[in-house]
Image (cartoon, rainbow, N blue to C red):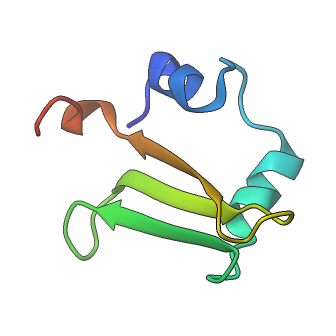
Amino acid sequence: EFSSETIYRRFQSVRTPSKSLMAYLFEVDYLDHFVFVLTDGPDGPVVADVRFVRDAADPTEAEIAFIVGDAYQGRG
C-alpha cells in the first residue's frame, strides 16, 4: 500500500495520477523505458517499482525513480 505521503514523494503531488500519467507508466518498451515491479510472493501485491527512462537527447543518460510500499520502507 502506498500512502498519500509516499505518492507525494514519488510524484511531487498528492493528487491521484492522471490517466495520461498512468498510460505513460504502463507503456514500457524495456529499452528506453524499463521497469522492475516487485511483489510480495508470486501472487502477492506490488510492493515496489523501480524504473528508468533514457534521455532522448543523450541516450547515455537516464532518469531513475523508485517507489516502495509503506510497509516495506526503512527495512534496508
25 shown above or below 74? below
Residue 22 percent across, percent down from the top left:
75, 52
In which image quadrant can residue 46 be found?
bottom left
**Residue nearest the viewer, comparing 33 with 45:** 33
Residue 35 percent across, percent down from the top left:
53, 68
Q: Residue at x 44, y 55 (%)?
A: 49
Residue 18 percent across, percent down from the top left:
83, 39
Q: Residue at x 44, y 68 (%)?
A: 36
**Residue nearest the viewer, comparing 45 with 56:** 56
Image quadrant in which the C terminus is located: top left
Q: Is residue 51 left or right of residue 59?
A: left
56 shown above or below 4? below
Residue situated furthest left in the rendering:
75
Residue 51 percent across, percent down from the top left:
53, 60
Q: Is residue 57 left or right of residue 54?
A: right
In which image quadrant can residue 37 be found?
bottom left
Q: Is residue 67 left or right of residue 33?
A: left
Q: Residue at x 84, y 66 (%)?
A: 56
Image quadrant in which the N terminus is located: top left
Q: Is residue 68 left or right of residue 13?
A: left
The total of numbered circles placed on residues is 0
75 shown above or below 52? above
Q: Residue at x 22, y 33 (%)?
A: 71
53 shown above or below 73? below
**Residue nearest the viewer, comparing 41 with 50:** 50
